[in-house]
Image: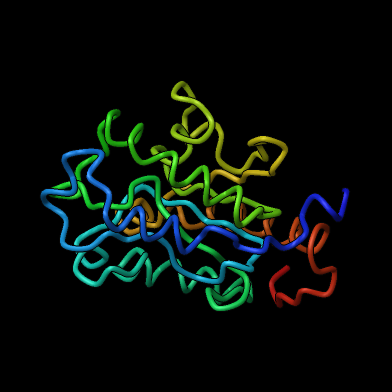
């Protein structure tokens, strides 16, 4: 593929966008949040991972994926020989926690999605991973089903997207771990193809 298409972004505007999100009042969630959770990982990373929304631990700390789901995610990264510090940039559809960790409302996603769209433009990833049904539908279409689409490469404005299950689903149903690992193995192979042919993973 065209190497220039996936050249690392200069990150122009990312700090300004983060600052705007921190002071956002576009939906009612700003009244109940403790912290805005804007992003995590490495802005120079070639993989952009997208979750649903911050949970309790994220809302309290202001950091993305630090609860039980995040801990499981880090184990998956380690198996892939990926790290947040080098390979992964992370954000969510929503930057504020929905009370009780409920599913984001349509109007909340509509208000927050422009932040994510701008993040994708700025980061310019080679690979996007969506975690769970909410992220899949918000990015690629309301009628898509995670059980049908996971493990199959999709396109988002000429960027490759791998839908997979959210780690919270794995915590509820450990039988899904095998499917998610198969999806991440495809990501490893694509990462070698597009970014670093020498990326080492002892399992793939």
Q: Position of residue 99 (x, y in %)?
A: 13, 48
Foreground pick, 200 / 14: 14
Q: Nearer the viewer, residue 133 or 183?
A: 133
Displayed quadrant of residue 56 = bottom left
Quadrant (top left, top right, bottom left, bottom right) of the C terminus: bottom right
Location of residue 130 with respect to 167 vertically, above or below: above
| Residue at x-position 63% and y-position 68% | 44
Q: Nearer the viewer, residue 88 or 114?
A: 114
The residue located at (71%, 54%) in the rendering is 126
Q: Is residue 181 left or right of residue 99?
A: right
Q: Is residue 51 left or right of residue 188?
A: left
Please state which of residues 15 and 2 is positioned toward the viewer in this rendering.
15
In the displayed structure, 104 sits above or below 193; it is: above
Q: Residue furthest right?
A: 2
Q: Quadrant of the rendered structure where residue 55 is?
A: bottom left
Position of residue 42 relative to residue 47, above or below, is below
Q: Is residue 160 left or right of residue 5?
A: left
The residue most toward the top is: 143
**Scheme of image coloration:** rainbow
Residue 175 relative to residue 101: left or right? right
| Residue 163 drawn at (x, y percent) | 55, 43
Residue in view at x 24 percent, y 72 percent: 61
Identify the residue at image location x=80%, y=50%: 5
Q: Position of residue 149 (x, y in %)?
A: 56, 34
The percent coordinates of residue 92 (x first, y second) are 40, 51
State how many labels appear. 0
């Amino acid at each position: 593929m065209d190497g220039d298409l996936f050249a690392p972004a200069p990150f122009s505007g990312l700090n300004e966008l983060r600052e705007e999100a921190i002071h956002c009042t576009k939906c009612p969630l700003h009244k109940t949040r403790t912290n805005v959770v804007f992003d995590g990982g490495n802005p120079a990373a070639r993989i952009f991972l997208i979750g649903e929304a911050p949970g309790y631990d994220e809302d309290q700390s202001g950091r993305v994926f630090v609860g039980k789901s995040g801990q499981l995610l880090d184990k998956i990264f380690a198996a892939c020989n990926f790290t947040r510090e080098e390979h992964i940039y992370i954000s969510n559809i929503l930057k504020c926690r929905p009370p009780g960790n409920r599913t984001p409302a349509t109007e909340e996603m509509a208000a927050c999605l422009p932040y994510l769209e701008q993040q994708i433009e700025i980061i310019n990833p080679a690979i996007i991973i969506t975690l769970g049904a909410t992220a899949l539908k918000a990015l690629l279409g309301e009628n898509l089903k995670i059980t049908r689409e996971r493990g199959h490469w999709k396109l988002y404005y000429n960027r490759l997207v791998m839908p997979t299950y959210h780690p919270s689903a794995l915590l509820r149903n450990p039988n899904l771990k095998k499917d998610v690992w198969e999806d991440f193995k495809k990501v490893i192979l694509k990462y070698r193809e597009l970014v670093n042919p020498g990326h080492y993973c002892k399992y793939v």
